[in-house]
Image: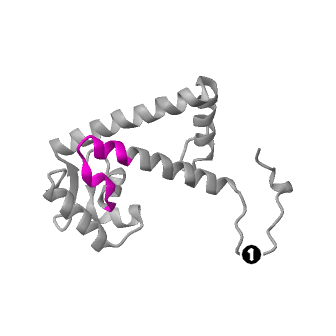
Amino acid sequence: MVKSLDDIELPEKPTELIDHVGFRIWRLAWAWKSEFDAAMVARGHGWFAEARANLLPHLDRGGTVQSLLPARMGVTKQAVQQFVDELVDDGILERRANPADRRSNIIGFTRKGQKVLADANVVKIAIQKRYQARLGRDRFAMLLQCLEILDPEGDHA
């Protein structure tokens, strides 16, 4: 059982970690991502176990101006360039001219990339069904509601 914050005592040594909600969320997110990546690798997308796969969630489905990606990902322009180059070489992404600014590119999904997204949706649904089976329908719905409330970008109305 989780203690309330009032019941948690700070450790004697500042280097000792306390059990806290952030660590639990991080650990669950890591477990989810590991399961997701392994399933995508099993579906034939071996590069999902590599850092470049982390670019995909930051792309808008209609395409994204490449210069927006470093800030979205929290990485350097050079890292984004490398990830995009590799995914273009693999046929997952394509660069298109930006009609609003000739100096920039729009990064979008190819047909092969759209197949990857479809496979990803199948995997996500399978993981979600396992979570729902473990928690039960009502507790799972409550989990989703709580996550929505805690999401700083969510609409809490």
Across and down, in percent, residue 126 comes to 41, 32
Indicate whether 78 appears above or below 27: below
Q: Secondary structure at mark 1?
A: loop
Total marks in image: 1
From the viewer's side, name the closer residue of 108 and 140: 140
Q: In the figure, 27 relative to 16: above or below?
A: above
When the figure is inspected, residue 31 is found, relative to residue 101, above or below; the finding is above
Crowd around label 1: few <14 · some 14–19 · many ≥20 (10 Å):
few
Tag 1 residue: 14
Find out whether residue 138 is within the magenta segment.
no
The quadrant where residue 99 appears: bottom left
Is 50 one of the magenta-colored residues? yes
Q: Residue at x 26, y 54 (%)?
A: 47
Position of the C terminus by quadrant: top right
Q: Report x, y in % for residue 21.
A: 67, 53
Which quadrant would the N terminus be assigned to in this image?
top right
Viewer-side residue, 26 vs 146: 26
The answer to whether residue 58 is seen in the rendering is yes
> How did the renderer colour the structure?
one colour
Q: Residue at x 47, y 33 (%)?
A: 128
Magenta stretch?
37-51
User: Does 148 appear above or below 65?
Assistant: above
Residue under the point 62% across and 46% down: 150
Type of secondary structure dominating the magenta stretch? helix
Left or right, 104 with reference to 121 = left
Q: Name the amino acid type tagged 1.
A: Pro
User: In the current view of this chain or complex, which residue is farthest to the top?
Assistant: 137
Estimate the x, y position of residue 87 in percent, counting from the top left: 20, 57
Quick check: 40 left or right of 157?
left
